[in-house]
Amino acid sequence: MTILGDGINAHNLLNDELLQRTIEAIKEDLKARIVSTRPKEKETREELYNEYQGVIKFEQKLKSTLDNGNLSRKRQGD
């Protein structure tokens, strides 16, 4: 796959309604679970936080891939 092709795929994923609803549902679930932990459940809270950060990193990677594809497309057009 090329950088441009990856960018196109990232664009499609970022604009896929089902994927976006799923990501948002996961994030909301994790946030709710984090705030419902008891003060003594530090390890559980940290695990949930790390899961949440993983979802954020996934989104960021898709956006970065899209940006790289757009940059590649612009460079090819020059």
Image (tube, grey):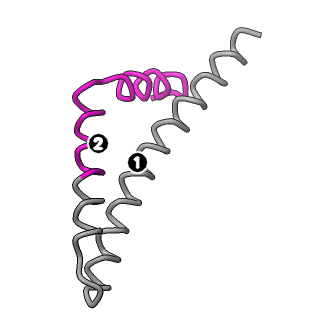
Q: Residue at x 44, y 23 (%)?
A: 11
Q: Residue at x 30, y 85 (%)?
A: 43
For the C terminus, the image quarter is: top right
Tell me if residue 17 is in the magenta stretch: yes
Measured as percent of width and height from the top left, residue 6 is found at: 46, 28
Residue nearest the observer in this picture, 22 or 75 = 22
Measured as percent of width and height from the top left, residue 58 is found at: 40, 48
- Give the class, few, some or many, for how many residues have Cα within 10 Å of label 1's Cα (few <14, many ≥20): few
Question: Which residue is label 1 attached to?
Answer: 58
Looking at the picture, which amino acid does disc 1 mark?
A: Phe
Residue nearest the observer in this picture, 14 or 35 = 35
Q: Main secondary structure of the magenta part?
A: helix
Tell me if residue 19 is in the magenta stretch: yes
- Establish if 21 lies above or below 26: above
Query: Which residue reaches farthest top?
Result: 77
Residue 6 falls left or right of residue 44:
right
Start-end of magenta stretch: 1-28
For the residues labelled 2 and 1, the Cα–Cα distance comes to 9 Å
Query: Element type at marker 2?
Result: helix
